[in-house]
Amino acid sequence: MTDETAAPTTFRDLGLGEDVLAALDTLGYEEPTPIQTAAIPVLLAGRDVVGRAATGTGKTAAFVLPLVERIEPGTPGVKALILCPTRELAVQVAEATHRYALRKGLRVLAVYGGQDIERQLMPLRRGVDVVVGTPGRILDHIRRRSLDLSHITNVVLDEADEMLDMGFQDDIEAILESTPKERQTALFSATFPPRIAQLAERHLTNPERITVRAPVLETPKVRQVAYVVPRPYKMEALSRILDLEAPTSAILFCRTRHEVDELTEALSVRGYRPEALHGGLNQGQRDRVMKRFREGTADLLIATDVAARGIDVEHVSHVINYDIPQTPEAYVHRIGRTGRAGREGTAITLVQPRERQLLRGIERIIGAPVEHGRVPTIADLRARRLELLRAAIHETLEEGEYGAFRDAVRVLAEQYDPLEIAAAAAKLASDATRGEEPEDGKDIPEWDPTRERPERDSRGPRGHTDRSERPSAPRRGRSDQTMTRLYVGVGRRRGVRAGDLVGAITGEAKIPGDAIGAIEIADQFSLVEVREDLADLVIQRLGGASVKGRPVSVRRSHD
């Protein structure tokens, strides 16, 4: 059995090829996690693996990267099958696989219950290399003969304990029996009940057992708050939280260098003074960034975990996890940078709805709940600004250095009540200093936990369910609204994500997020559903506007 707790410096040490390393570099990944360190070399060597690791330890990359490395594009048939317990996880794993395999040109497809099966049949007929799916829908395709597993060389069972708990054991057994005996199989599970051991014994050949143990972690005595925010609204939520918290100095953590640069640029546009710190900077650049942060000429330091190692700053009032850490250890390490030497500190984490399981895992490991906050509303921000204005006026009155303004006020007092004059002056000061508010005055939708109620799989076993939420795009508009599809002339090759399109449309056309439906992103263009009554407005306002730094064309789609 392998029990790894330390990670090497780079992914290159693990034996990955240049195409995969280049993809990781593009994504800004800087170092492997312990489960990746332990599993990747073993899987690259062709051995079966039984891995014990919780959600959020980086296990997706641990099994996907070797799989991508070993598969040769252009060969016939589906070569790899990844089974996941839920639609949500299947989509997430498929997206990760696509990103890692982009330079190799592998074709990846997610198949799951709840989606029109006809939308899955066409890609399967054209040919795919990797299929990621839920057991129920995979078995549907096998029985329809639309999915041929005779060329399979790699099978992965992700979250195997959850799949068994959901009643998928018979389906899993039937699926594995449909694959060649000569295959590589990897099984990952957070727990190892007897049924998992029996499954591994029946279907894996002399597997290497890998365990990543979760250490007992002590968290610093800081205020810890989490906000559940859908992805398209993360930037706006962060801005409001910063306005309300008004940190004297803060470190914001992102997962990758690319995200650090994007967030630094976005906050600069909004009037903050951020500095980026990541592995793409040389030592001289790092020193200059840290000098500006220590001296206070930069109030926000935006960093990756690796780049932030060794940072010694006397007082950081806030640590903000713009991306939730993938491991509890990383979480504790991050928030330990505030609340030092007995000072007060605040740790804030933005959590996408699909990442709530990661947060629960962190709470379980640290042995304490994290406070769940409500994203500040427009009214909250206005109240905060009035509070700060009152404090500023009080301070000015105490200092008494306002004699030069008495004459102007004395003239006005002959016509108006002094209280009205003071209120008007306060309004002028507030208008001059306050941040921008959305023109339509709408607040960020508050996440409703009841939306986590799962949708039923088209044939879920024993009435169990198979959950999904599209990770980036908002849900369709109300059922009584007709939707139309728009062509937007920018796509995946420009790094566009659904959140970028949602932000551009809501920002330029000033329409609510629930007026936007399904979003499909191709290499060169994107297709976006919007409410029919707002389509012309979106075409007019978004056409020629910039998305990811490039002016785009927008028109109705006729496909």
Image (tube, rainbow, N blue to C red):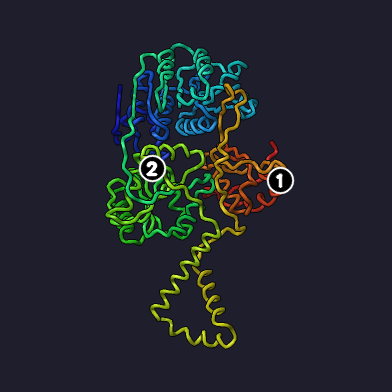
Q: CA distance from mark 1 to mark 2?
A: 48 Å
| Residue farthest toward the front in the current orientation of the protein | 368
Whether residue 126 is visible: no
Q: Earlier in the sequence, mark 1 or mark 2?
A: 2
Image quarter for residue 423? bottom right
Residue 209 x, y percent position in the rendering = 34, 21
Q: Split into 4 quadrants, where in the image is the C terminus? A: top right
Residue 200 x, y percent position in the rendering = 41, 17
Up-down relation of residue 246 to residue 138 (above or below): below
Q: Tell me the kind of residue under disc 1.
A: Glu
Write down the residue under mark 1: 532
Question: Is 446 or 91 nearer to us in this picture?
Answer: 446
Residue 22 x, y percent position in the rendering = 40, 35
- Look at 39% across and 13% down and name the residue there: 205
Secondary element at tag 2: loop
Write down the residue under mark 2: 368
Q: Tell me the kind of residue under disc 2.
A: Ala
> With 340 as the anchor, is 64 left or right in this view?
right
